[in-house]
Image: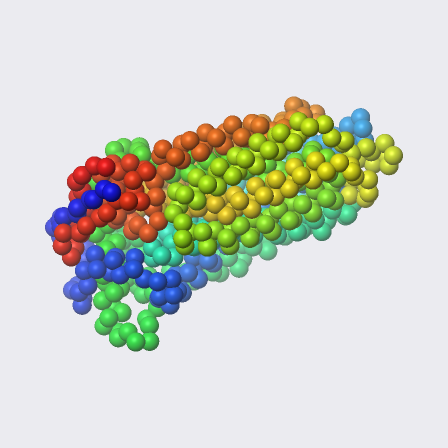
């Protein structure tokens, strides 16, 4: 077990950051210890308003989850393919693998731009104003995709929509991490993943309902429903308090104090003086952490993410997100198309996609139970191991010869939802079953836990920029996989079908190996304690067993000792 001893520091008294006038005193270390020791019930009683605002602002990702899976899953919808695809010799309509990649990657490219733009705007204008700008832009860009008449215009709409989506990806996670106490942080940051799954489930429901619609409204209706999201979310953002951490970085302590008051609830047996003292102690804790991080860094630019101890923190944050790609999650995004290429017709493919995202939502609920009893590292590693088994079994099953759907008797394309014939062989269903298991495990482990880890690993002063870099790495990896995945599945390209599972088994194994050596345990740690462990260069495998012992009531953040 590693013991890290902390010593007091007076450097914050000489800081340029002003302090508010004296208030009833509670040491920041005391309230930090009290916060860590709060039960779940006490947290719910103290911070219901912080939870509400985090939940409401994370709804931007319900909208994004809905929108991002529309185009990949429209590749199996006849009216959409007849509008944007080309007729094949067998009577099927197909969009080429190159255009499939372009339409999906257009949004990823826009997201990378939006991530950096959002990170810059968030530091300059604050989280609320940045979200309001992104929501306004979303409403306009939806118009382009709705009225698109060619693949080129649809691609332009996807690229433009990607920019505000990139903004949402950063702000929701950072905001939840900023406004919530340690005990609730894991639940509400994993809720971010639940928002994605809820949006995907909504999209799958809409697409399944339109599978028998042979008119243009089969694909226009899903696009048009995107307009239902921005206005109510806009109203919620207008009413929400700004992050107190951001306000402290702007030296606006009065507004930071007001924000903390709005985020905390005064209990029935608590006097006004005690509530005020607790608020001031939290504010000073934020200031102390901010000051120490300023001393440990030369600045808050993107280049500072790659300097000193923050280089390691940036690597871990980036890899946490890249692992979501390496494990084979792209098969979930192309699920309907994947089920078809595995041998199922369109009706069953869309139904299974609906079941898949419902299981994903149940998986997120299961993750809330898991994070209460199991550490982040253990969940992440075990989840990756199970996903590795799922994709390699999919590949093995795909090598077994099975009867593909015969369309000669009906004269209809395989994806036609009115086709009743279906292979009697069980292997396509078993393959589909493993993808369903994959989805449930993914959304119970690395899907939601990633958002918790990326909000805890970076230093608070560089958190938004580190998350921007990490999510950009995720999107770059996503662009690469969205180029090769359609080629793997498309019968006009590589035509691997479900044998693509072999490829993803190899990349998933890389993620498992990296996580074993590099992923630290952050469960139950405050931001100040995580800073200490990284500054002491504690080995990732020893984070869990390292003890932090304060010398005095106010903690300095210098460390000594090595594992």
Count the numbered circles shown: 0
Q: x and y percent of residue 441 in the render?
A: 53, 44
Residue 559 sits in which quadrant?
A: top left
Q: Quadrant of the C terminus?
A: top left
Q: x and y percent of residue 178 in the render?
A: 35, 53
Left or right of residue 58, residue 257 in this image: left
Q: x and y percent of residue 171 in the render?
A: 42, 48
Q: Does residue 408 sit above or below 433 in this rendering?
A: above
Name the foreground residue: 370 vs 552: 370
Q: Does residue 511 sit above or below 358 in this rendering?
A: above
Tell me what residue is drawn at x 32 percent, y 65 percent.
261
Residue with the most extreme right position: 409
Tell me what residue is drawn at x 80 percent, y 28 percent.
90
Q: Does residue 374 sit above or below 156 in this rendering?
A: below
Residue with the most extreme top position: 494
> What coloring was used for the rendering?
rainbow
Left or right of residue 100, residue 404 in this image: right
Q: x and y percent of residue 40 in the render?
A: 38, 62
Q: Is residue 491 visible?
A: yes
Left or right of residue 428, residue 482 in this image: left
Q: Is residue 164 visible?
A: no
Tell me what residue is drawn at x 33 percent, y 72 percent.
267
Q: Quadrant of the N terminus?
A: top left
Name the foreground residue: 306 vs 140: 306
Tell me what residue is drawn at x 13 percent, y 54 percent.
552
Name the foreground residue: 240 vs 91: 91
Left or right of residue 407, residue 360 in this image: left
């Amino acid at each position: 077990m590693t013991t890290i001893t902390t010593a007091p520091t007076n450097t914050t008294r000489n800081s340029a950051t002003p302090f508010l006038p004296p208030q009833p005193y509670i040491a920041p270390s005391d309230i930090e210890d009290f916060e860590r020791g709060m039960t779940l019930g006490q947290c719910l009683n103290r911070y219901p308003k912080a939870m509400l605002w985090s939940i409401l602002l994370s709804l931007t990702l319900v909208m994004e989850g809905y929108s991002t899976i529309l185009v990949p899953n429209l590749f199996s919808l006849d009216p959409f393919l007849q509008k944007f695809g080309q007729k094949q010799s067998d009577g099927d309509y197909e969009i080429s693998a190159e255009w499939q990649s372009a339409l999906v990657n257009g949004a990823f490219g826009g997201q990378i731009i939006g991530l950096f733009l959002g990170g810059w705007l968030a530091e300059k204008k604050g989280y609320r104003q940045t979200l309001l700008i992104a929501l306004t832009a979303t409403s306009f860009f939806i118009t382009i995709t709705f009225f698109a008449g060619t693949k080129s215009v649809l691609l332009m709409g996807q690229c433009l929509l990607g920019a505000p989506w990139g903004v949402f990806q950063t702000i929701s996670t950072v905001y939840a991490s900023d406004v919530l106490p340690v005990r609730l942080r894991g639940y509400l940051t994993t809720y971010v993943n639940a928002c994605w799954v809820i949006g995907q489930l909504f999209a799958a429901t809409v697409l399944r309902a339109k599978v028998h619609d042979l008119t243009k409204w089969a694909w226009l209706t899903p696009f048009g429903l995107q307009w239902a999201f921005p206005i109510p979310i806009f109203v919620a953002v207008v009413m929400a308090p700004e992050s107190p951490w951001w306000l402290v970085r702007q030296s606006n302590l009065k507004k930071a104090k007001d924000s903390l008051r709005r985020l905390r609830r005064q209990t029935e047996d608590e006097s006004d003086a005690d509530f005020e003292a607790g608020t001031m102690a939290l504010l000073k804790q934020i200031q102390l952490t901010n000051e120490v991080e300023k001393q440990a860094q030369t600045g808050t630019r993107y280049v500072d993410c790659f300097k000193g101890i923050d280089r390691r923190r940036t690597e871990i944050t980036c890899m946490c997100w890249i692992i979501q790609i390496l494990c084979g999650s792209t098969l979930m995004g192309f699920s309907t198309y994947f089920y078809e290429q595995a041998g199922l017709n369109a009706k069953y493919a869309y139904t299974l996609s609906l079941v898949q995202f419902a299981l994903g939502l149940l998986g997120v609920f299961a993750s809330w139970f898991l994070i209460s009893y199991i550490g982040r590292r253990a969940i992440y590693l075990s989840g990756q191991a199970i996903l590795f088994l799922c994709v390699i079994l999919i590949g093995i099953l795909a090598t077994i010869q099975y009867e593909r759907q015969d369309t000669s008797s009906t004269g209809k394309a395989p994806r036609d939802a009115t086709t009743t014939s279906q292979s009697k062989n069980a292997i396509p269903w078993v393959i589909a079953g493993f993808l369903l298991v994959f989805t449930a495990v993914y959304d119970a482990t690395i899907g939601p836990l990633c958002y918790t880890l990326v909000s805890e690993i970076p230093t608070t002063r560089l958190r938004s920029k580190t998350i921007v870099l990490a999510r950009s790495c995720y999107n770059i990896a996503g662009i690469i996989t969205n180029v090769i995945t359609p080629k793997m599945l498309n019968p006009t390209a590589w035509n691997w079908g479900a044998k693509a599972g072999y490829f993803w088994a190899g990349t998933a194994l890389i993620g498992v190996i990296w996580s074993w050596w590099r992923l630290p345990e952050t469960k139950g740690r405050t931001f100040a304690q995580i800073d200490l462990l990284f500054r002491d260069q504690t080995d990732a495998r020893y984070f869990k067993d390292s003890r932090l012992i304060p010398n005095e009531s106010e903690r300095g953040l210098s460390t000594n000792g090595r594992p």
